[in-house]
Image: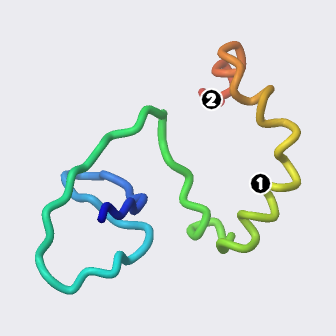
Amino acid sequence: MLTAVEGVYKNGEVELLETPDYTEATRVVVTFLPGRGIVNLRDRGIDREEAAQLRWRLRSMAEDWERPEMEVYDEL
């Protein structure tokens, strides 16, 4: 059985964003995803439920956000 857990790689370490259900040493494969950075919502006071609500309310804008020409705003 494979288990996927999201995490963040920073300064040579991987920080998992949730705790998998393993109690013994287990082999892992780390895959680096494309992207410019990660916004830690917890650091901004947003919990999982609030994040899900935001995603739902803003879903109609997702197609526009993903357009290549919108990358200019990533640098702001």
Name the spot of residue 68 as percent of width and height, x first: 65, 15
Comparing 44 with 7, the one in front is: 7
Q: Mark 1 belongs to which amino acid? A: Arg
On screen, 72 above or below 3? Answer: above
- Residue shown at 69%/27% (left/top)? 66
Task: Report the side of 12 relative to 2 (left or right).
Answer: left
Q: Specify the quadrant that holds the N terminus.
A: bottom left
Comparing 21 with 70, the one in front is: 21
Which residue is most to the front? 1
Name the spot of residue 41 as percent of width and height, x first: 61, 63
Comparing 2 with 58, the one in front is: 2
On screen, 65 above or below 58? Answer: above
Please name the residue that numbered disc 1 is placed on: 55
- Residue shown at 82%/45% (left/top)? 59
Please name the residue that numbered disc 2 is placed on: 74
Q: Specify the quadrant that holds the C terminus.
A: top right
Q: Mark 2 belongs to which amino acid? A: Asp
Q: Within the image, what quadrant is residue 5 found in?
A: bottom left
Q: Within the image, what quadrant is residue 6 found in?
A: bottom left
- Residue shown at 31%/52% (left/top)? 9
Helix, strand, or loop for circle 2? helix
Name the colour scheme: rainbow
Task: Report the side of 25 relative to 52 (left or right).
Answer: left
Q: CA distance from mark 2 to mark 1?
A: 18 Å
